[in-house]
Structures are given as C-alpha cells and as structure tokens.
Amino acid sequence: MDTINAGALRTGIALGDVLALFRDVDEGLTKADVVRLTGLSRTTVNQRLDSLLGAQLLVPAPEDARTRGRPASRFVVNRHRGVLLVADIGATGLRTAVCDLGGEVRAEREAPSDVTAGPTAVLALVDELFGRLLKETRHEESDVLGVGLGVPGPVDFGSGRVVSPPIMTGWDRYDIPGWFAPRYDCPVLVDKDANAMAYGEHRLRYPDTAHLLMVKIGTGVGTGIIASGRIHRGADGAAGDVGHIQVTVEDVAEPPLCRCGNTGCVEAYAGGWALVRDLKEAGYEVTTVDDAVRLIRSGDITAVRLARRAARILGGAIADAVNMFNPRVIAIGGQLAHTDEQLFAGIREVVYGRSLPLATRNLQIVRSELDPHAGILGLSQLLTDGIYAPERVRQLVEGTAS
Amino acid sequence: MDTINAGALRTGIALGDVLALFRDVDEGLTKADVVRLTGLSRTTVNQRLDSLLGAQLLVPAPEDARTRGRPASRFVVNRHRGVLLVADIGATGLRTAVCDLGGEVRAEREAPSDVTAGPTAVLALVDELFGRLLKETRHEESDVLGVGLGVPGPVDFGSGRVVSPPIMTGWDRYDIPGWFAPRYDCPVLVDKDANAMAYGEHRLRYPDTAHLLMVKIGTGVGTGIIASGRIHRGADGAAGDVGHIQVTVEDVAEPPLCRCGNTGCVEAYAGGWALVRDLKEAGYEVTTVDDAVRLIRSGDITAVRLARRAARILGGAIADAVNMFNPRVIAIGGQLAHTDEQLFAGIREVVYGRSLPLATRNLQIVRSELDPHAGILGLSQLLTDGIYAPERVRQLVEGTAS
C-alpha cells in the first residue's frame, strides 16, 4: 500500500497548495482566480486567503495597497515575510547571501576560505558573514526562515551530512544542520555545490527544460543533474560524479594520481588543480586556479594547449553523460568557464562528434548565465520550495495564530 | 503560472485516485479504509465506489463474494475487466503476451523475427500473434484496454514513434500506434526495450528501490534508467545509451566499426553481435548470439577469454554510469546474462574497482530475475499505470454508464 500517496490524498488542497499558486505570478491573483484554479468554494477560498493574509504570507498587491478606502482585490506573495541565508562553500572561497522569500539576493559577501580547514573553521566564518548580512539588511535571527549551504562534496540530503568526500578533509558525517540549530529556528538544507548550481540555472534560466546538466569546472570537476525538473541525487547522494570517471589519454604513459586516490580520473587531467600542477611543471609561477585562468586568457601558448587538452578530455566525459542522460541543456560554470571560447570549442567538438545524433541535435552547450551566483541562487530556490510545502505553511500560519 | 499544477488541484480526489488505492492491495479495502485514506465523507466514498463497481473496475473481494445474503464489505480491483496486449520486439525475435489488468501474463507466444525486415512485416506478425492469444484466452478485440510494444531503439514516447534508430532499418518515424488503431480502441504505448525491462524489474522485484539501472546485453547493449521510481527517457528518448559510449581498449590498434557508424563503441566490443564476429574470426562456426552463449557456457577457452574481455569493457561503461547516476541496483539481462558467472565476475571487478566507494558500498549487481520476461512484464505494468490515470478511469466509467 502506497502510504505516501494516501497521505498526499488526505491533505486535499492544503494552505501550501493555495500559496503555491501565487508563486512566480508577479502581478498576483484575485479571489476569483483562486476559485477558478482550485475548484474550491468561494467560502473556503475566503478562509484560506484570510489565514495566509493573517500569517502575512500573502499581502495586497502594490497597486491595490495604494487604493485606500476599498478592500484589496489582488494579492501577492509577501517576499519580505522573512529572509533566507545561503552559503556556497567552494574549495578555496565562499560566498554568502541574504535573500528574500522570492529567492532574490538582498545582500551578499564573499571571502577566501580553505575547505580543508575543516567544518568548525569554515562554518564559524559562514556564521560571522551571516551575522553581518543580517545586520546590514536590518534583520533579526528570528526573521530567518531557511538556511541553505552548498558544499564541494557528496551529501546525504536527508540528514544534511557530507559523506565520504574526496577533498573535504574532516567533514565526513559532520552534523552541519546541528551547527546552525542554536541560532536559527528553521530548516537547514545542505546540498552538493553543483546540484545547487544546476537547480538555480533550471529554475531561473531554463524553467521549461526538464533535463539539464550543470558542469562546474573549478578546482575540481563536478556535475549537477536535473531530471524531470528535479535534482537527481542518486541512491547515496553520489550522482553526477563526472570528475572521477576514468579516462585513457593517448599521449600519457602514466595516468596522473587523483585527489580521490585513484589514477586517471577526468579531474586529474582537466580540473583546475591539475592545470595548476601542469603549468607549474612547465615552469610557470602559478599557485591558484585563478592564476591559471589568467594565463590561459592571456593567450600563452602552453596554457592554451593545456586548456584545449583539458577541454577535449572533459568533452569525452560529457559526451558519455549525454549518451547516458540525454539532457536538453548543458550549462558550464566554475572559474575555468571564464577562459573565453577555448574550453567551449574543445568540449563542443568532442560532444557533437561522439554522442548520438538524436541526443545532440537539439542540445545546447552554454556558459552558465548565473555563475558565479548560480550556487547561492539555487540554494535560495530550494529553500523557497520548502516555504510552499503544505506542512511548513501550516506551521507558519499556526505560529502566527498562537 | 503553472497551469499543469492548477489542473491537478482542480481535479481534487478523482475516481482514478480512489481506484489507485486498491492497486497492489491483494486483500482489498473496505469503505471505512477508503474514508480513512482519502478524508472524503462516507457519502462521497459511497458514490465513488458505486461508480467503480458499476463500471466493473472494482468487484467484491473473493471471500466476500462467497458470503451470499449480506452486502460485500471488502473490494478488490477487477483484474478481469479487460486485457492488455504486449509485445517485446528484439533484434532477432519477439515475445507477445496477453495480460490481465493486474499485469499478470495469461498466455504468451514467441517467434523468431528480424527487426530489420521493417515495421510492416514485424507488426503483421505481432498482430497475428495477438489474434491467436485473444482467441486462446477467449477474448474479443473489444476487451483490449491497452497495447504496449517494446522496441530495440530510441523512442519518442509521446508519439510512440521510433526516432533515428541505429539498427531498426525502415522504422524511423513510423507511426506504430496508427498501425493498431483500426483494431483496438485503446491507448497504444511504445517504449525502448531496456526501459520496459527496467520498469518491470523496478515495479515487480525492487518496488522500494528508487534508482535502478537495467543493462540488456543481447545482440547490442542497451540500458534503461529508473530515477526516483520513474523511467528516465531524457529530452529526446535517447537516454541510457551505454552501448554507444566510446572506449579505448589497450590491446586494440584499430577500434572496430560499430553498427551506429562510429568506431570503438562499447557494443562494438561487447555486444552479442561483436562476440559472434570475433568468434567467427577465430574460426568458429557461429551465426547467432545464442551460438556464442552456448560456446561460452561450454567453457571453450577462446570464447571465455572473449567473454571476460567483453565483461571488463562493459564494466568500465557501467562504472561510469554508476558515477553519473548512483543507482542502488543494477539488473543485467539479455542473452549474454545467461553465460553463468563469467560476465558478472568481470563486470563486478571493474565497477567495484573504479567507481567511488560511496556509490558502490550499497550497490547490488544482479542478474535480472524476470528476464526474459522483464520486457513484457514492464510493458504490462506501464499499461496498468495508465488504467489508474484519472482521465482514463472517467472514460471507462462513462463508457459503462452510456
């Protein structure tokens, strides 16, 4: 017996479902619209809207609010009912933001940060930046309705814990939501960075594209998969691990050692850290991925040759992903996506040459438009989804009533 | 505005939703169960059950039917309200069956058939077998509530047309549902063979496993992906094409030509047709994949060596798929899955060695339990899903009322 299904039936048309109708409708809806869209009676709609207005989850539409003296006829979501705090934690830096309930960034701050310093050091910095962002936007901790974090490793989404991360030293099984619990009385969500980026790109740039692949080429190589409009995390949160697919490269006798312990992985050839390694070996003074990006953009012949080789290797892995998953859009982000056309030309060449014609004839390979904000925007969209969940709306309404 | 969502809200708890509660509950449900599960009033539940009983979609549970003289209190789905016809079309043979509405096979027939003979010849044979199956089980064409076909190529699921198939000569864009329309007044569903197999294995053997991969190793190599309990078909119906991922094999100077026109594809090394080719070249008298399977099972050293090489190459492609999709179960079917442990040992060795530990620690690699019936059982399950769709139930109820 499918009890989840039965549960969904039992709730009928919940407050959250009514609130969800208003999402993404900037001009708002009237009572008549809600009656028409739900099939509920006018009396029931009045009750539901009164609850949502009472809890300040809905407010009169701006033009209505100006027409004093007669009751409002059109309502919109109250984006300022609370705020969301998000942090996109990368290998060498992090970006934090405070967002409204529409998911829009109100203020943001970034800082360098070494993820291998471990959870306590990194989360203390996140906390400090969150505090400054709240102060800056004149909000209290009690205004925070959701906290979201993106991390560069596999996540058990249910518990919000990082699991067996190849590069996040000291983070394995660390209780990230528990860290925030003392200060914020709200859901805390943790996801893999590339998943958050993929979801942001899908919701905000390609909302009608059901199948999308986000490839993040930063220090490492990660992928986020949108299948049927949802993040595909897989059985253990390990899905989308293109970076550790093993490849054979013809002119290489000894496959390079990867950060994960294996040899010959995609990112051991084509990740930012691998390019830094190769450029150092070639005698250049580079220490960061940004240094490598600058060198490639300057047109340095060796750097460009290495970037093109990286692109062809990435292209091979992406071609396999296309055969496997058949997305409509591949969005590429991360620092190396900003090396102009070098990388894209190489990737496109291999993907269009190697994948089946059926899978590529409508395929778009594009630079992520949201990058470097794709991560924080995706997290805020994921948190916003949670705000419209029936159970959460009930809590928010009851919290107001009591 | 998400009109699909609004539409789903408007239908409320439809007849189909009520009927769906009875699915998979062999012992049936009482009126009180339905009231409890739906939250509907007793009066409404009485009305809905009367409609479903009137349309013979529900019937009294067997033990109740025996207790004459008092009204039935427990109801079950009427599996005999109609039948489903399914055909699993392979490269060199096809299997047809007539199933009840629970998806159970009532009679089946198989026949050799060359898919490259084109749609008219193959579908005429399917038609003939369907006619014989109906006669055998004493059914009329008007009893048929669904027709389902599995084919060895990519399918545009919406239109039921095969698109750009690498091996199905003459089938490109052929209107398969149109062929059956004159005889059967019901939905006709067409899907890729490996998708149907994956769905059968998921629904009947691993119903609690959300993420499953089916690998069919027959004449070619195909994959069906179950993501979050649903078939992942991708943007063009081309998903799951592991067979045409390109691989580099160290001891091969010139990568072999594949049936798709490229060189070095997985199936050009490891598909049944490639094994037949290699065994012929080694001087053996083999013409079919079954010949090759027999030779491997006999323990012939050359045949076993080739099978192990095929397994390692398949294992590499499956390892990449594991990194990408992170399934919980990989079920392997097709003729070559019946070469005892040769194939499985090779595949497991490479997958557990090459995929990330996180993605493999709970991974099961198993022989498909349903094979060679996985395809027809998956098709009948897909058709059964359609029977419980609200719109279809409404039609069936109204058809009875008029």
Image: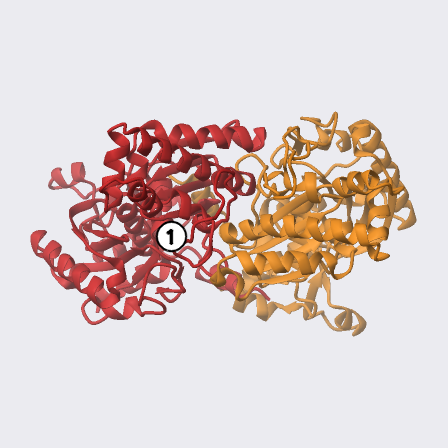
Chain colours: A orange, B red
Q: Position of residue B109 (x, y in %)?
A: 15, 49
The answer to whether residue A131 shows anywhere in this view is yes
Residue tagged 1: B17
Helix, strand or loop at disc 1? helix
Q: Nearer the viewer, residue B66 or B41?
A: B66
Residue A263 higher or lower than A399, as above or below:
above
Where is residue A362 drawn, in percent x and y?
54, 66
Mark 1 crowdedness (10 Å alpha carbons): few <14, some 14-19, many ≥20: some
Amino acid type, mark 1: Asp
Q: Residue at x 49, y 32 (%)?
A: B351
- Location of the N terminus of chain B by quadrant is bottom right
Q: Position of residue A328 (x, y in %)?
A: 56, 61
The location of residue A113, given as percent across then percent down, is 85, 37
As drawn, A24 above or below A312? below
Along the line of sight, the residue nearer the viewer: B303 or A335: B303
A292 or A299, nearer to the observer = A299
User: Which of the 4 image quadrants contains residue A276?
Assistant: top right
Residue A381 visible in the snapshot: no
**Residue ID at (29%, 47%):** B375
Q: Is residue B396 left or right of residue B325?
A: left
Q: A74 and A294: which one is in front?
A: A294
Image side of residue A364 versus residue B130, left or right: right
Q: Which residue corresponds to the image point at 78% horizontal and 41% vertical from the top-left?
A: A278
Which quarter of the figure is the C terminus of chain B placed in?
Answer: bottom left
Quarter occupied by residue B64? top left
